[in-house]
Image (cartoon, grey):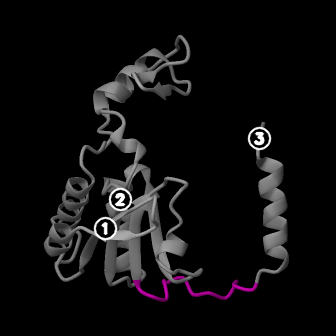
């Protein structure tokens, strides 16, 4: 069952009282957040944002992929952000598999897999695709370590200016708190 009708109805209600059409393109608070796509995270709430305040870049795990860095560089170079946050989170799905597990699942079927106490399982037979073995899925073994790795990857990228600070945090999905990763923030200075 699709949620299309619900989304369109919600948008109609939102647009009926929309009064923010004159917001400028550059983010007003001049910072960007790279975080996970997990539906339990609401960066606007945990970072106190309103429309127009900051750029929020989301992907699986909140990882510093080439595309995330591309977005951060555009955010800085063309739209004036001056500080960046890398925020991973507890209980992340990216901790539940490896590159090999993902490649194996994709090779047997492109349909949605399931997980239980014994691990990941495919729901059905093919068709699958072997292209998954050529992708680094940027899985996570240790949250603090992955935040540090991502901050270092961002700071060492040749298109990232040395004077932009990058802060590292882990969002706790149980408490809603941001937990500092001091080693990452230090590396991001």
Is 10 displayed left or right of 47 in the figure? Answer: right
Vertical arrangement, residue 139 with respect to residue 24, above or below: above
Secondary structure under tag 1 reads strand
Q: Earlier in the sequence, mark 1 or mark 2?
A: 2
Q: Nearer the viewer, mark 1 or mark 3?
A: 1
**Magenta span:** 19-30
Q: Nearer the viewer, mark 3 or mark 2?
A: 2
Indicate which disc residue 75 carries.
none
Task: Please report the residue visible at 83 percent of the width from the left and 50 percent of the height from the top.
Answer: 5
The residue that disc 2 covers is 88
Q: Magenta segment: does it hold 26?
A: yes
Q: Are marks 1 and 2 in contact (CB under 8 Å)?
A: yes
The residue that disc 3 covers is 2
Q: Residues within 10 Å of mark 1 (few under 14, many from 20)?
A: many
Whole-percent x, y for residue 102 in the image: 37, 29
Task: Please report the residue visible at 52 percent of the width from the left and 13 percent of the height from the top.
Answer: 126
Task: Please report the residue visible at 34 percent of the width from the left and 42 percent of the height from the top.
Answer: 95
Q: Magenta segment: does it hold 132?
A: no
Q: Earlier in the sequence, mark 1 or mark 3?
A: 3
Distance of label 3 from label 2 (alpha carbons): 30 Å
Secondary structure under tag 2 reads strand
Vertical arrangement, residue 74 with respect to residue 103, above or below: below
Q: Residues within 10 Å of mark 3 (few under 14, many from 20)?
A: few
Whole-percent x, y for residue 122 in the image: 49, 19
Q: Nearer the viewer, residue 147 or 58?
A: 147
Distance of label 1 from label 2 (alpha carbons): 7 Å
Is 38 displayed left or right of 158 in the figure? Answer: right
Whole-percent x, y for residue 112 in the image: 55, 28
Residue 107 falls in image quadrant: top left
Indicate which disc residue 169 carries.
1
Vertical arrangement, residue 43 with respect to residue 40, above or below: below
């Amino acid at each position: 069952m699709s949620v299309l009708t619900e989304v369109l109805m919600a948008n109609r209600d939102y647009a009926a009282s929309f009064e923010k059409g004159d917001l400028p393109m550059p983010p007003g608070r001049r910072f960007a957040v790279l975080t996970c796509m997990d539906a339990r995270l609401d960066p606007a709430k945990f970072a106190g944002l309103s429309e127009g305040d900051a750029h929020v870049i989301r992907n699986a795990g909140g990882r510093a992929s080439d595309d995330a860095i591309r977005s951060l560089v555009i955010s800085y170079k063309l739209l004036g952000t001056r500080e960046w946050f890398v925020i991973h989170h507890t209980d992340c799905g990216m901790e539940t598999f490896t590159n090999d597990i993902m490649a194996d699942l994709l090779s047997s079927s492109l349909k949605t897999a399931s997980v239980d106490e014994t691990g990941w399982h495919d729901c059905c037979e093919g068709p699958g695709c072997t292209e998954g073995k050529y992708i680094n899925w940027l899985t996570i073994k240790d949250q603090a370590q992955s935040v540090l790795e991502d901050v270092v990857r961002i700071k060492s990228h040749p298109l990232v200016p040395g004077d932009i600070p990058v802060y590292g945090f882990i969002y706790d999905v149980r408490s809603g708190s941001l937990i500092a990763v001091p080693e990452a923030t230090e590396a991001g200075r």
